[in-house]
Image: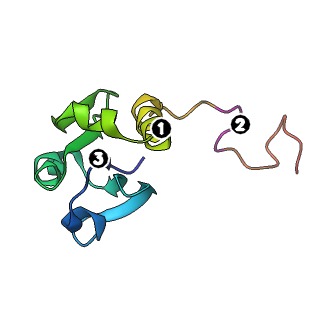
Amino acid sequence: MADEVLVVGPGPELSRGRRWHVLERAGDEVVVLSAGIDSLPAIAEHSRLAMARRAGGDVEIAGDERAAQGLGESARIFVDAWRSRSLAKPHRRGEGLSWDAEGFEPP
């Protein structure tokens, strides 16, 4: 998974995507940037709230968590979904094998 930082209330510096690439938007108030957790303090300087997920799944927060409460319903759902998603890739039987590996039917 690429490193991501979710931002609530991004300033113009973040919305334009000049320093960090914008991966997703949920209206004008929420963006997901391609950035590592080490960029969290710098990103937080240009936003009301910034969140990044550590490798273990914990979410690190910089800024005012109440900023998310003032969002519209769809943006709040987006933020909640981003925070709750799993980082672990599910195990799929046969992952990485050739399509014609023994015990599997070709497409």
Foreground residue among 56 and 27: 27
Crowd class of label 1 (few under 14; some 14 to 19; many from 20; radius 10 Å):
few
Crowd class of label 2 (few under 14; some 14 to 19; many from 20; radius 10 Å):
few
Crowd class of label 3 (few under 14; some 14 to 19; many from 20; radius 10 Å):
many
| Magenta-colored stretch includes residue 8 | no
Foreground residue among 3 and 30: 30
Structural distance between the alpha carbons of marks 3 and 2: 40 Å
Q: Secondary structure at mark 2?
A: loop
Range drawn in magenta: 92-96
Query: Mark number for residue 60?
Result: none
Q: What amino acid is found at the position of numbered circle 1 in the picture?
A: Glu
- Mark 1 = which residue? 73
Q: Main secondary structure of the magenta part?
A: loop
Q: Position of residue 62 (x, y in %)?
A: 16, 38
Q: What amino acid is found at the position of numbered circle 3 in the picture?
A: Val
Confirm or deny contact between disc 3 and disc 2 (CB under 8 A).
Answer: no
**Which residue corresponds to the image point at 29% horizontal and 26% vertical from the top-left?**
58
Q: What amino acid is found at the position of numbered circle 2 in the picture?
A: Gly
87 over 96 or under it: above or below: above
Q: Earlier in the sequence, mark 3 or mark 1?
A: 3
- Mark 3 = which residue? 8
| Magenta-colored stretch includes residue 93 | yes
**Which residue corresponds to the image point at 61% horizontal and 30% vertical from the top-left?**
91
Which quadrant would residue 75 be assigned to in this image?
Answer: top left
